[in-house]
């Protein structure tokens, strides 16, 4: 079973705990859902199937406790006694088969469980029981008195009391945080709304201040489970044990950062029920590329193919001060596997870049006027014998820019990739609402600033709900959207969304976007649909970036051209 998503740097790392060791990081079927969908699933399981809430909470508690124990063992490289008693210890032993002596190692651990009044708190109390049975010391810290607790939380609190698990009530009892080795955040889950308030807010602040490792039940308290936006205050966790199904907000920053390593564990919701839920989106893995998008990541070239088989990309890009943009996009298209590439560029630029990429054809356009309406007609003429047009990188701003882009938008009967300056031109000319819907495939590849201009909102608003905005924009305008940034979101015109799993912070460098545009155009030329090309393109771009960064001493030294070399 693939059940782990690790947040490291910009990457989303999927791990396999089937006992066969880690397979490729990008395998598995990982879908995410909204908090409303999760609540519905919980309710259906409890009311329609008849599985009691207490059973789900029991499973949640056991999963959280197992993760805490794993965390303690990993942290301290403690080994578990082969003869450990009880289900949890046997389980630990399964996962640490080479462990040796020190049955008492977990007794040195003293975890504080922050218990909210809702069912997230119930999960935390159940986890405390399993931790005590595993030999850890545990103290419960209640945010509210019993009168305010949900039925399930109250029931769990009563069990904990009968078992003599020490507990305190926040605000009434004194507490010395120095005695603890870790904290479980079971304050707020999917029932959370807005900024944490009252005791809950104070407990979050204090937990963060301790500097102790924090493990979250389901989501970090203070993270929006649907968008990944942060409320204030918000838990900063080391690990988040996401219950049942991955929550959408944990795939996007800054929520992903607050969550730390995200582990998704089953709590007993029947697979049959879960299968009926239309996912809010998918994490891009090899399986998702294949199953959801019909892309074979390992596809080979036909043995009888020729350069015509793989399509011809036309790139309209570059200006005197940004000649590299066109070069990077065109070269990336070739490395992505298109048969041929032509770079349409301002005439004055051509002598300076001739021969820079010998495999590339140059097509000077626009005469002494450079980009403009006349150049657009030349580009369209060139496109008659080419398969795909990519426009935008390094164009700069120029007179007649609106007429130039509109001519290409309306006149290009081929798949079109719109990037960089072309997106700003589009926004300045009224945005997509003012433009005709194109019949051929159209992919827009904005970074958050360009997206903000296109959507007429601030960049902060874009980042607050990248998934929701990308989906709504793609649906409304019938285009495929690639919303760049860490965890790039690909939104298809049918409303499906995919979150990229590959990449490295080193890719935040000039020209990396031009390379992506070229890769996507290269995939389109080979016959992929817009959403296939966009999703596979961002996936490959990130993989190549990771490889390129690994070859350097520091990811910071990565150049966009290095990404191309690793394709
Ligand atoms: N639904 C189930 O049966 C199961 C859920 N699981 C876990 O439970 C939570 C969701 O539980 P729920 O009771 O719906 O909500 P919360 O625990 O998140 O608590 C909501 C609680 O807190 C109050 N509240 C809401 N927002 C705030 C705020 N900003 N500040 C302070 N207080 C707030 C609100 O009034 C509610 O009373 C889910 O995440 C799972 O962890 C089980 O795992 C399985 C069964
Ligand atoms: K929580």
Image (cartoon, rainbow, N blue to C red):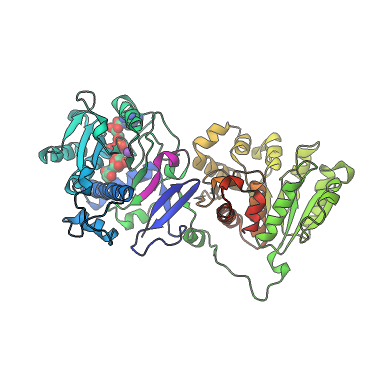
Residue shown at 72%/54% (left/top)?
330
Q: Residue furthest right?
A: 368
**Circle count:** 0
Quarter where residue 15 is shown: bottom left
Can residue 483 be seen here? The reply is no
- 468 vs 390, nearest the viewer: 390
Image quarter of the C terminus: bottom right
Q: Image height check: is 414 above or below 310?
A: above
Left/right placement of residue 56 relative to residue 262 reads left
Ligand 1 resides in the quarter of the picture at top left
Residue shown at 52%/52% (left/top)?
502
Image quarter of the N terminus: bottom left
- 195 vs 507, nearest the viewer: 507
- 245 vs 203, nearest the viewer: 203
Residue shown at 77%/39% (left/top)?
401
- 524 vs 219, nearest the viewer: 219
Residue 189's x, y, as percent? 33, 38
Quarter where residue 250 is shown: top left
Residue 2's x, y, as percent? 38, 58
Residue 406's x, y, as percent? 74, 43
State the extent of the magenta-drawn residues as a range: 254-263
Residue 474 lies in the magenta-colored region: no
Residue 550's x, y, as percent? 55, 54
Left/right placement of residue 232 relative to residue 9 reads left
């Amino acid at each position: 079973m693939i059940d782990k998503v690790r947040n490291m740097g910009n990457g989303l790392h999927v791990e396999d705990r089937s006992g066969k060791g880690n397979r490729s990081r990008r395998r598995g079927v990982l879908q995410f859902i909204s908090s409303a969908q999760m609540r519905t699933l919980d309710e259906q399981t409890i009311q329609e199937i008849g599985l009691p809430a207490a059973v789900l909470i029991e499973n949640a508690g056991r999963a959280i406790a197992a993760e805490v124990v794993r965390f303690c063992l990993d942290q301290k490289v403690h080994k578990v006694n082969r003869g450990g008693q009880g289900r949890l210890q046997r389980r630990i032993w399964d996962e640490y088969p080479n462990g040796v002596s020190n049955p008492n190692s977990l007794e040195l651990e003293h975890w504080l469980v922050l218990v909210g009044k809702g069912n997230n708190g119930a999960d935390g109390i159940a986890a405390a029981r399993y931790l005590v049975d595993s030999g850890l010391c545990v103290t419960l810290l209640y945010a509210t008195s019993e009168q305010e607790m949900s039925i399930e939380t109250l029931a769990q609190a009563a069990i904990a009391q009968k078992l003599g698990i020490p507990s305190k009530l926040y605000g009434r009892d004194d507490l010395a945080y120095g005695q603890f080795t870790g904290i479980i955040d079971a304050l707020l889950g999917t029932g959370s709304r807005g900024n944490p308030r009252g005791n809950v807010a104070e407990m979050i602040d204090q937990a963060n201040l301790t500097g102790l490792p924090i493990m979250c039940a389901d989501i970090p308290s203070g993270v929006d489970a649907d968008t990944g936006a942060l409320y204030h205050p918000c838990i900063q966790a080391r690990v988040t044990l996401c219950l049942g199904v991955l929550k959408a907000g944990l795939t996007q920053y800054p929520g992903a950062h607050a969550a730390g390593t995200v582990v998704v564990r089953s709590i007993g919701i029947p697979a049959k029920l879960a299968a009926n839920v239309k996912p809010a989106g998918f994490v891009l893995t090899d399986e998702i590329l294949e199953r959801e998008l019909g892309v074979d990541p390992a596809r080979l070239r036909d043995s009888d193919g020729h350069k015509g088989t793989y399509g011809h990309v036309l790139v309209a890009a570059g200006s005197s001060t940004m000649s590299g943009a066109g070069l990077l996009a065109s070269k990336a298209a070739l490395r992505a596997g298109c048969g041929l590439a032509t770079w349409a560029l301002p005439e004055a630029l051509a002598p300076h870049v001739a021969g820079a990429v010998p495999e590339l054809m140059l097509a000077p356009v626009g005469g002494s006027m450079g980009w403009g309406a006349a150049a657009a007609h030349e580009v369209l003429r060139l496109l008659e014998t080419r398969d795909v047009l990519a426009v935008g990188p390094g164009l700069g701003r120029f007179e007649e820019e609106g007429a130039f882009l509109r001519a290409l938008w309306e006149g290009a009967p081929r798949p079109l990739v719109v990037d960089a300056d072309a997106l700003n031109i589009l926004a300045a000319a009224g945005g997509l609402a003012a433009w005709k819907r194109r019949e051929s495939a159209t992919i827009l590849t904005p970074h958050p600033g360009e997206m903000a201009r296109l959507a007429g909102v601030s960049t902060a608003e874009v980042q607050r709900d990248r998934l929701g905005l990308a989906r709504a924009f793609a649906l409304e305008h019938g285009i495929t959207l690639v919303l760049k940034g860490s965890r790039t979101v690909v939104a298809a015109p049918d409303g499906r969304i995919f979150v990229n799993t590959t990449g490295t912070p080193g890719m935040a460098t000039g020209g990396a976007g031009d390379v992506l545009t070229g890769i996507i155009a290269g995939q389109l030329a080979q016959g992929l649909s817009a959403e296939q090309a966009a999703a596979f393109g961002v996936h490959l771009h990130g993989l190549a970036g990771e490889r390129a960064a690994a070859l350097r001493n520091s990811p910071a030294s990565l150049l966009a051209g290095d990404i191309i070399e690793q394709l």
